[in-house]
Amino acid sequence: MKSSIKPLVSLGFAILLGFGTPAIAMNEQVSEPELDTLTNAVPEAAPETAPETAPETAPEATIDETADVAPDAEQLLSYIDSLRGYKDQSFSFELSNISYKKNEQKHRNKLVVQVLNDASLVEFVAPARSKGRKILKQAQNMWIRFPRTRNVLRVSPAQRLLGETSNGDVTGTNFSEDYTATLEEASVENKTINDKPVLKLLLTAKHDKTTYQQVVFFLDSQNHQPVRSDFYARSGKLAKQAYYTEFKEFNGELKLHKMRLVNPIIEGSFTWMMFDNYQKQTFEAAIFHKDALSR
């Protein structure tokens, strides 16, 4: 029987960015403390579920049951990309990160991200002490500028930003551009996740500037939405796992809304990423140049 993805959303350019590990440092040292130490903290117990939002039922992608060919790996990869952005269209989105560690206070930040092709401009809007901080990504290059300075420093996409999130996680991502995709047979223990039969999609880096050498996606076999992804550093070590917990329609197109990043080594360490307010927009290309950061 053929399975194919119906075009509920545009195939597209999308963020994450890859995910970073503390072991990979900035190309140049930044004198300020790590960003997660600068965020406002509120002493609370770390919840295992995402902060509450108004309930919405996201439409699911469907399978064409009249077809007779298995889904194509590159098609599946394009569909994953479409859940984080729009194909050949500049856009923006808002992102809130909330980090939890066992027996510690939570930390949070809020960002606005603008994306044009393979460039992304990230601006911090909260907490107050980080407001105005900017990160610019151009292809595989990345820079940061701190408020009240004109210094622009090169950083690594893999550098930790907040909790389990990295610099690369919060920019626009395009897996199709940076990885090749292969469908593989899932191991016995991974044939079902959360009681859902899954497909295993292995992504292998095309070049040495990606945040991860490999990413393994486990996709719902019925609607092809991601259920979990595993991110592997260049050393082969499992750096983190992502659980995709909610999708939501924005202007009639399905997008990722909530994702939980889990540290596979440190128990009780995880970060919620909440994506909101996706909008197609037109931007001046000049704002995505390194020189514009220092203005």
Image: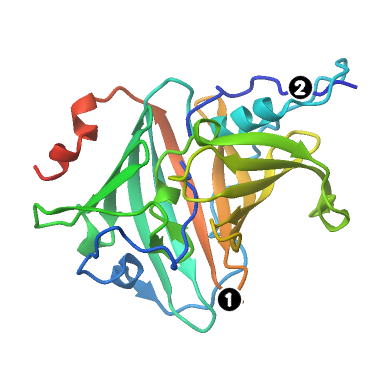
Quarter holding residue 172: top left
Q: Is residue 113 above or below residue 41?
A: above
- Residue at (65% x, 35% y) in the render: 181
Give the residue pinned by disc 1.
Answer: 266
**SS at badge 1:** loop
Q: 247 and 33: which one is in front?
A: 33
Q: Which mark is residue 71?
A: none
Marks 1/2: CA–CA distance: 38 Å
| Residue depicted at x 62% and y 46% | 246
Left or right, 174 with respect to 26, comes to right
Q: Secondary structure at mark 2?
A: loop
Residue 31, position as x, y percentages in the image: 20, 69
Going from N to C along the chain, the mark reached first, 1 or 2, is 2
Q: Which mark is residue 4?
A: 2
Name the amino acid, label 1: Ile
Q: Nearer the viewer, residue 121 or 260?
A: 121
Q: Nearer the viewer, residue 34 or 186?
A: 186
Point out residue 236 in the picture as x, y percentages from the top left corner.
61, 59
On screen, residue 75 above or below 175: above
Asked whether, in this view, residue 285 is left or right of residue 156, the answer is left
How was this image coloured?
Answer: rainbow
**What residue is rendered at 36% in x and 59% in y?**
109
Q: Quadrant of residue 162?
A: bottom left
Q: Going 24% across and 34% down the picture, which residue do you hit? A: 288
Quick one: quadrant of the C terminus?
top left
Q: Are marks 1 and 2 in contact (CB under 8 Å)?
A: no
Q: Badge 1: few (under 14), some or many (20 or more) residues near its Cα, within 10 Å?
A: few
Position of residue 284 in the picture relative to residue 208 (left or right)? left
Name the one closer to the observer, 234 or 104. Answer: 234
